[in-house]
Amino acid sequence: MTSRPQVRRRPVAQARDGFTYAEYLCLPRLLDAQRPQAVPAMHDELMFIVTHQAYELWFRLLLHELTAARDAMLAGEAERPWALLARCHTVERLMLAQMDVLDTLPPASFAEFRSALAGASGFQSVQFREIEFLSGWPDRRYLSAGLPAQERDRLQRRLDEPTLWDGFLTVLTAAGHDVSDPERRAGVLAELARARGDRRGLWRLAEALLDHDQSWSLWRCRHALLVERQIGVKAGTGGSTGASFLRSRRDRRFYPDLWEVRSRL
Ligand code: HEM
């Protein structure tokens, strides 16, 4: 009987010159980045930090995908930006579901470590603001919010760049539509909404933008509810009136034209 040659497998993680999973993902740095501040230590603070960090990672990915979608539209493409926006929409659904984790935080427990945040607030999230600028709300007022120079430069760059909406108008123009003024634009959008066949692709792209807009509104509503659930009517650590301030911003939309066209159909 012939015996089979014994194949000795090297662990997959070390297949490339000892390059490991932990190195690829920079895990030592990543897992060393959770620094609870409360004294004495509070069990729930780690969850609070991890969920916020997870959001920042999703924001990082969204910026990558939305920028690529914008650039593809500026190049006159419609198919690839649609696929990229579909990915963003999937991430945004996860971001919405992720709020449930914070609902497991008992408000009395949050009240015990909240002072450890001092003046830190999600309001200062530069990536969140970059997404809003890129999507279509370039608001210069955030530049004067006392940000460190590096963060202010990032926001300034986003303000100087075209938005996703600029990209979409480029695609429409490249397809032969006149979108030079609001009335013509509204007419074009209504025509696309009723389109069949080949022109359907442009409406599909418009709907992908609306999905992004809707997801962002849903996140804002969900976040405002979370805030009310955690701190009631108390002021925010960032200095705002808290839940009422957030509620006042809930109805802001990236693409009012895409919402308004519904009334014309
Ligand atoms: C217990 C959980 C949370 C509480 C109590 C809370 C509270 C608040 C409050 C009161 C504000 C208004 C600004 C201020 O005065 O501080 C705010 C803004 C904000 N928070 Fe939260 N937050 C929570 C969780 C989160 C999470 C998980 C994120 C994800 C990154 C987040 C991101 C933001 C952002 C981006 C803003 C600015 C919103 C805008 O300008 O429209 N927050 N938060």
Image (spheres, helix red, strand yellow):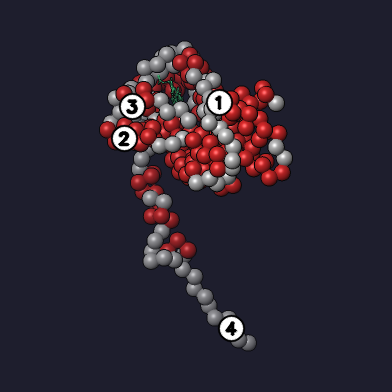
Mark 1 = which residue? 182
Where residue 10 appears, as percent x and y from the top left, is 46, 68
- Identify the residue at horizontal 55%, vertical 43% (top origin): 174
Q: Amino acid at mark 3?
A: Leu
Where residue 32 appears, as percent x and y from the top left, is 35, 43
Mark 2 = which residue? 153
- Crowd class of label 2 (few under 14; some 14 to 19; many from 20; radius 10 Å): few
Q: Secondary structure at mark 4?
A: loop
Depth order, front residue of 136/221: 136
Q: Amino acid at mark 1?
A: Pro
- Identify the residue at horizontal 54%, vertical 20% (top origin): 251
Give the mark nearest the N terminus, 3 or 1. 3
Mark 4 = which residue? 3
Q: Residue 248 — which label?
A: none
Give the mark nearest the N terminus, 1 or 4. 4
Q: Quadrant of the C terminus?
A: top right
Say above or below: 188 vs 27.
above
Disc 3 + disc 4, Cβ < 8 Å: no
Spatial CA span between label 2 and label 4: 67 Å
Q: Amino acid at mark 2?
A: Asp
